């Protein structure tokens, strides 16, 4: 159902990489984006893996806070593949800080990446590809923290709540063009960033986070990617305007974790 379609995945590590590889396994051609030199290396590694599956792939530089770079990125994808069938807005940033200490610079950077940049990626891809095609699936990566915020995440929680609601709004406006827009809200996922944080010893109890999850473990990036692939496909053709939570039961469960003074604590 996805064979020979084209997907843009913003970001190149963690869930972003898993999403790109998951879509490629279904026969999708992939465009991934990167920001830093380290991200570029991760993007190149993803491209090699995608090409080993017999699919085409490109990587493009992108600072989602800059609208001209979003336009240039979409130009590059359309120039290479001629269409965009799937957009996975996965690039994100999270600054741990109390609201009373939050600076304007921190607010502008985090909301610029997590919400503003995400919206303009949606807008450019819709206006320049999906509207004309009269088809497309946009998956915006939100977070359970956009549903239930935790202490020290005022910007991230607020921005991810915005991602959920802009996804619902765009589903209403763009539905007549057969363009579906959904949010996916992961809980704690074993990405490189979280694993390194645990190894660093900043958490007094390495198992403190997983105790907040009824299933008793972190999610895997590949599990999030499987959900993304399903929502991208025609198997979910009547799903739009939804926020799909994938968190091992954390929201329905017992306790949430909070980052306080560099240590993960339970609420």
Image (spheres, rainbow, N blue to C red):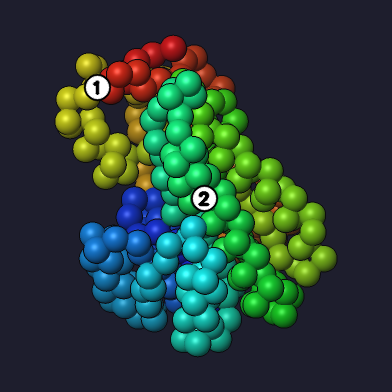
Q: Quadrant of the N terminus?
A: bottom right
- Determine whether 201 is above or below 107 in the image: above
Which of the 4 quarters of the picture holds residue 161?
A: top right
Question: Is disc 1 surrounded by few (<14), some (14 to 19) or many (20+) residues within 10 Å?
Answer: some
Query: Measured from the top left, where is residue 5 in percent x and y?
Result: 54, 76
Query: How far apart are the alpha carbons under marks 2 and 1?
Result: 29 Å
| Left or right: residue 36 compared with residue 77 | left
Work out which residue is located at the far left of the displayed protein and give it.
200
> Circle 1 — which element?
loop
Q: Residue at x 49, y 58 (%)?
A: 65
Secondary structure, mark 2, is helix
- Front residue (pair 105, 117): 105
Going from N to C along the chain, the mark reached first, 2 or 1, is 2
> Looking at the picture, how far across and down is residue 199, in whole percent?
17, 32
Residue 1 visible to the viewer: no
Residue drawn at x 52%, y 81% is 75
Residue 25 left/right relative to 145 = left
According to the picture, the residue beneath numbered tag 2 turns out to be 112
Looking at the rendered image, the disc whose residue lies closer to the viewer, 2 or 1, is: 2
Residue at the extreme right? 176
Depth check, front residue: 175 or 65: 65
Q: Please state if 179 lies on the left or on the right of 35 as rendered.
A: right
The correct choice, above or below, for 228 with respect to 75 in the image is above
Q: Which residue is mark 1?
A: 203
Whole-percent x, y for residue 185 in the image: 54, 40
- Looking at the image, can residue 70 be seen? yes
């Amino acid at each position: 159902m996805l064979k020979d379609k084209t997907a843009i995945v913003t970001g190149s590590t963690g869930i972003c990489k898993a999403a790109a590889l998951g879509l490629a396994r279904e026969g999708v051609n992939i465009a991934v984006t990167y920001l830093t030199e380290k991200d570029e290396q991760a993007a190149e590694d993803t491209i090699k893996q995608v090409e080993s599956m017999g699919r085409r792939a490109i990587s493009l530089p992108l600072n989602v806070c800059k609208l001209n770079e979003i336009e240039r990125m979409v130009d590059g994808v359309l120039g290479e593949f001629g269409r965009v069938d799937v957009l996975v807005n996965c690039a994100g940033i999270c600054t741990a800080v109390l609201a009373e200490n939050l600076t304007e610079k921190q607010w502008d950077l985090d909301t610029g990446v997590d919400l503003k940049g995400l919206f303009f990626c949606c807008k450019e891809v819709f206006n320049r590809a999906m509207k004309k095609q009269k088809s497309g699936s946009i998956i915006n990566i939100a977070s359970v923290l956009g549903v239930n915020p935790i202490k020290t995440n005022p910007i991230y929680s607020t921005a991810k709540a915005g991602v959920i609601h802009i996804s619902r709004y765009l589903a209403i406006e763009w539905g007549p063009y057969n363009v579906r827009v959904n949010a996916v809200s992961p809980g704690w996922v074993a990405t490189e960033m979280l694993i390194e944080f645990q190894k660093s010893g900043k958490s007094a109890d390495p198992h403190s986070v997983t105790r907040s999850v009824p299933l008793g473990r972190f999610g895997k990036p590949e599990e999030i990617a499987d959900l993304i692939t399903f929502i991208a496909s025609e198997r979910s053709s009547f799903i739009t305007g939804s926020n799909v939570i994938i968190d091992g039961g954390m929201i329905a469960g017992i306790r949430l974790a909070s980052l306080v003074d560099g240590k993960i604590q339970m609420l």
